[in-house]
Image (cartoon, grey):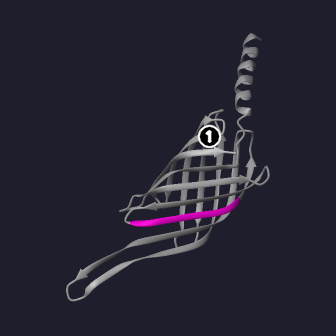
């Protein structure tokens, strides 16, 4: 009986510590993004956000501008629906517009018999994408999650990522993310501000 009461007390403490850790879909986050496809290491700012329209429906978006020998710009804007599994775990799905642009910096060279030759330019595409994932609040301070996305169009790709958020203050968390985009490795490190 004593053991049962002690176990009940410990379980109550653990559950009460986690029950207040509700997942929030109203936030902005920003940081440094890195993507390393073969021959390039794109680095630059990565900004994202989400806003809860209702308890279950939210809008989301993001913008990243990564650069190396070429520039890569990517933005997305869409809406999603969260399915609460329990107080600590959500599964969500959404659809969005996805814009991608690759820009080659203009370079010129004088070639004998041909004169000055220049090359460069950009290509872009806007397409439909679907995203989905899971978020889980491990305890008051740590959230983990994973996301999959399928982007259609001329620059179609499949990507997956996993993230960890660590609570720094009431509305501020540090975030780290590992991303794989068509087999190419990427990372994100930054902060999330919840409102």
Q: Position of residue 195 (x, y in %)?
A: 70, 45
Task: Name the element at disc 1.
Answer: strand
Q: Where is residue 193 in the image (x, y as percent from the top left)?
A: 63, 45
Boundaries of the magenta span: 70-79
User: Is 130 positioned to the left or the right of 102 in the image?
Assistant: right
- Measuring 76% from the left and 15% from the top, which residue is drawn there? 5
99 above or below 87? below
Q: How many marks?
A: 1
- Measuring 75% from the left and 23% from the top, which residue is drawn there? 12
Q: Is residue 90 or residue 165 the one in the foreground?
A: 165
Q: Is residue 12 or residue 2 the one in the foreground?
A: 12
Q: Dot 1, crowdedness within 10 Å: few (<14), some or many (≥20)?
A: some
Name the quadrant of the N terminus: top right
**Residue receiving disc 1:** 172
Q: Where is residue 95 in the image (x, y as percent from the top left)?
A: 68, 63
Residue reaching furthest to the top = 2
User: Is 53 positioned to the left or the right of 166 in the image?
Assistant: right
Residue 71 lies in the magenta stretch: yes
27 above or below 19? below
125 above or below 133? below
Q: Where is residue 109 in the image (x, y as percent from the top left)?
A: 27, 78
User: Is 169 positioned to the left or the right of 80 in the image?
Assistant: left
């Amino acid at each position: 009986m004593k053991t049962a009461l002690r176990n009940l007390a410990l379980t109550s403490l653990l559950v009460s510590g986690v029950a207040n850790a509700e997942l929030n879909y109203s936030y902005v986050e920003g940081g440094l993004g890195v993507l390393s496809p073969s021959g390039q290491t794109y680095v630059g700012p990565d900004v994202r956000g989400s806003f809860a329209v209702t308890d279950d429906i939210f809008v989301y978006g993001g913008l990243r501008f990564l650069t190396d020998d070429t520039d890569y710009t990517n933005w997305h804007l869409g809406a999603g629906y969260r399915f609460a599994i329990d107080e600590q775990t959500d599964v969500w799905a959404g659809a969005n517009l996805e814009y991608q642009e690759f820009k080659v910096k203009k370079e010129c060279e004088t070639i004998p018999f041909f004169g000055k030759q220049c090359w460069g330019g950009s290509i872009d595409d806007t397409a439909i994408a679907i995203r989905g994932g899971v978020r889980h609040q491990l305890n008051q301070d740590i959230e983990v999650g994973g996301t999959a996305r399928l982007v259609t169009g001329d620059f179609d790709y499949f990507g997956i990522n996993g993230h960890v958020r660590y609570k720094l203050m009431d509305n501020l968390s540090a975030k780290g993310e590992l991303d794989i985009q068509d087999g190419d490795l990427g990372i994100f490190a930054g902060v999330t501000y919840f409102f």
